[in-house]
Image (cartoon, rainbow, N blue to C red):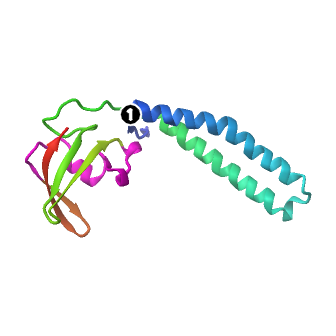
Amino acid sequence: MFKEAKYKMSEERLQQLKEELVYLQTVREKEVAQQIKEARSFGDLTENSEYDEAKTEQGKLYSKIAEIKNLIENAEIVKASDKTDSVGIGSRVTVLDHDLESEDTYEIVGSQEADPTQGRISDDSPFGRGLMDKRKGEIVEIDTPSGVLKFEILRIE
């Protein structure tokens, strides 16, 4: 039997997805239906670009709804780790990049909440996996296409 993938996320992220689903199924679906209705009123559907655009938008909307439903149905709620002796989901980790000699702080999150531009790194990413369960003072080596990068864990919060 095929096993559905689980999507790690916080309770807050699950709630955001549920709210987005309600919005898409109520407000946005009605807006798209109205666009289709208006486009139909323009006449011949074979040469009606407004109708084609509205139908394309409807397809995108239904695809997004299906995607969010899948995420909700297969959500795995993870609690932030209270431990500060090793890295886990919810940990804020300050590392020293040995090559650049710079310090950066990252938060380890589930894949559905990752946002590298905000310092939120997925536990499923190569960097996140490399940090998981490591302790303060440890050197972490991450394989990248450009070579091995070395980081030292300075703090875990």
Q: For the point 24% across and 42% down, which residue is it?
A: 92
Residue 10 rendering spot, x and y as whole percentages: 38, 33
Asked if residue 2 lies in the magenta stretch, the reply is no
Instruction: Please give left or right for residue 83 compared with residue 139 in the image.
Output: right
Identify the image quadrant of the N terminus.
top left
Is 134 located above or below residue 85 in the figure?
below
Q: Which residues are magenta?
A: 111-139
Residue 113 rendering spot, x and y as whole percentages: 39, 43
Instruction: Please give left or right for residue 27 compared with residue 65 in the image.
Output: right
Q: For the point 12% across and 35% down, which residue is it?
A: 85
Is 67 located above or below residue 148 in the figure?
above
* Amino acid type of the residue tagged 1 in the rendering: Ser
Could you say whether the residue bearing mark 1 is in a helix, strand or loop? loop
Dividing the picture into quadrants, the one containing residue 6 is top left
Asked if residue 113 lies in the magenta stretch, the reply is yes
Q: For the point 37% across and 47% down, which residue is it?
A: 114
